[in-house]
Amino acid sequence: MATGMETTEGREQSLSTWAGPYVTDMLGRAEALSQLPFQQYGGQLTAGPSALQTQAFQGIGGLTVPQNLQTAGQQAQQTYGTSQQYMPQVGTVQSYMNPYLEAVLEPQRREATRQADIARNQMQGRMAQAGAYGGSRQAVMEAEAQRNLQTLLGDITGKGYSGAFDAAQRQRQADIQAGLQGLGQQTAATQALTQVGQAEQAAGLQNLAQQLAAGTQQRGIAQDELTAAYNQFLREEAYPQQKLEFQRQMLTGLPIAAASFYQPAPSAFQSASGGAGTALELLKILGQIK
């Protein structure tokens, strides 16, 4: 016979009866979600070049030297000629002198010689009349006449060549001025056409830059749409987990599991009752005893 009362202590880890179905359902859903395969996003993640960007890229790729820049020199040459049309014609003064100058001077020299011969004959006639023909005085006078003739012929030649030189020099200078003027016109025309070509090129590049800027905005709008679609996919994919997390949070702090328990050992009376587990059964036993 026992001299004292024996007790039993322990910790129960079972779910509370009211929370069991709720937790079981939540765990079942979590298990089902964990078995799902990876769901790959099937949409487009990044926007490619926009239509405006594509056009701008094609325009940049097709850039060439503007037509006006390519043909500036050609058009100037067609309008004003080339430098070879001007400068090669400007040679030395000698090349400008009259090639027929000698033919022009020769009649003057012949006339001077003829007049000198006439004067010599007249002198000889006078010397003969004076009885001094063939003397030393005649020789001196003929020598002087010959010297005068040579001086006159030299003057004729010198004046002729001097005049021809002056005329040639003036013509040469005129040609130089004409050449320089032509070259100046050609240069001015080339510069003007070049400026037009440069302006066209600058305008084209500016248009392409504006097109690229607009294309960037266009692409940004398309990218925003793709990003929004991807974010929506992520939200939809996370929605089941969010619902489970909400369910789990609802259980936080609730007494869903029993803690420690203390149970005394059954008395002789309880043993006699046959281990009845409820008060109703015990009353029934007591009723039978009476």
Image: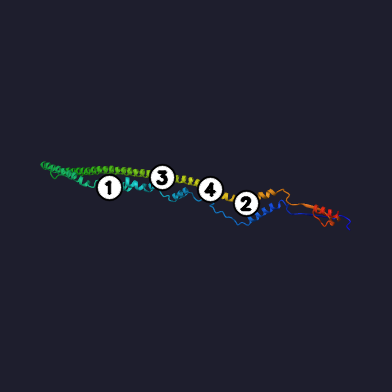
Q: Which residue is mark 2?
A: 240
Residue 287 percent location from the top left of the image: 84, 53
Label 4 belongs to which residue?
Answer: 225
Name the N-terminal-most of marks 3 and 4: 3
> Tag on residue 200?
3
Which residue is at 68% across, 48% downward?
A: 250
Dot 1 or dot 4, earlier in sequence = 1
Q: Is residue 275 left or right of residue 39?
A: right
Residue placed farthest to the left in the image?
Answer: 129
Mark seen at residue 248:
none
Q: Earlier in the sequence, mark 1 or mark 3?
A: 1
Q: Which three-letter amino acid code belongs to the residue tagged 1?
A: Ser
Instruction: Out of 206 and 273, give the one closest to the viewer.
Output: 273
**Residue 207 in which image quadrant:** top left
Residue 225, visible in the rendered structure: yes
Q: Residue at x 36, y 47 (%)?
A: 73
Disc 4 versus disc 2: nearer the observer: 2
Using the numbered discs, state the Cα–Cα distance from disc 1 to disc 4 in whole angstroms.
83 Å
| Residue tagged 1 | 95
